[in-house]
Image (cartoon, helix red, strand yellow):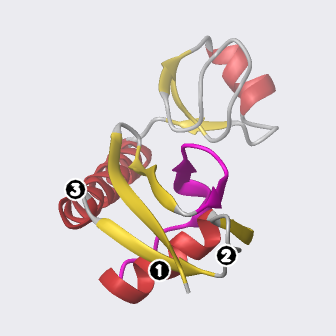
Amino acid sequence: MKVVLLQDVRSLGKKGELISVSDGYARNFLFPRNMAKEANAQALSELKNAEDSKKFKRDTEIAAANKAKAVLEGEKFIMPAKAGDSGRLFGSITAKELSAEIKKQKNLDIDKRKIVLSGDIKNIGEYEAQIKLYQGISANVRIEVVAK
């Protein structure tokens, strides 16, 4: 009997997969526990629609990431900060501050958790940062820290 899984089932498959199991296993175990439903025309149509929806969402996210990469790649952001005479900052430049600067200059919402700094930014100078926009898509930006 062909069934569509409604949730992950150990040793059978993941949610949304179409699998073939014995009739007794399906009727006595999977159906009563709402782990699967019979693969009729309606269930197969819902499965196809769900897969199409996931693909569309993934494609739009990739397109948005590529667009953001085109805007950000190679950009230089100037970050003013309070510093002492030796060039050491009072505090440091964080991913949160860089995210706010990108929002201000480029009008792009970048989550601070997606920004990977090359190290702690505690001195005046130039630094590199990598912004992970999507799986396999990232942009490298430069940060120039100047004294206020």
The residue shown at (63%, 71%) is 96
Contact check, label 1 and label 3, Cβ < 8 Å? no
The residue shown at (80%, 25%) is 29
Q: Name the residue under label 1.
A: 101
Tag 2, which secondary structure?
loop
Mark 2 residue type: Ala
Q: Magenta residues, as a range?
A: 107-123
Mark 3 residue type: Asn
Residue 131: % across, % down? 43, 53
Q: Mark 2 points at which residue?
A: 83
Real-space Cα distance between discs 1 and 3? 20 Å
Q: Which label lies toward us, 1 or 3? A: 1
Above/below status of 27 relative to 74: above
Residue 127: % across, % down? 46, 52
Real-space Cα distance between discs 2 and 1? 19 Å
Above/below status of 9 relative to 92: above
At label 3, counting other C-alpha atoms closer than 10 Å, the crowd grade (few under 14, some 14-19, many 20 or more) is some
The residue shown at (34%, 59%) is 57
**Residue 93 in view, yes or no:** no
Looking at the image, tell me whether mark 2 or mark 1 is earlier in sequence order.
2
- Foreground: 58 or 47? 58
At label 1, counting other C-alpha atoms closer than 10 Å, the crowd grade (few under 14, some 14-19, many 20 or more) is some
Quadrant, the C terminus: bottom right
Residue 79: % across, % down? 49, 76
Mark 1 residue type: Glu
At label 2, counting other C-alpha atoms closer than 10 Å, the crowd grade (few under 14, some 14-19, many 20 or more) is some
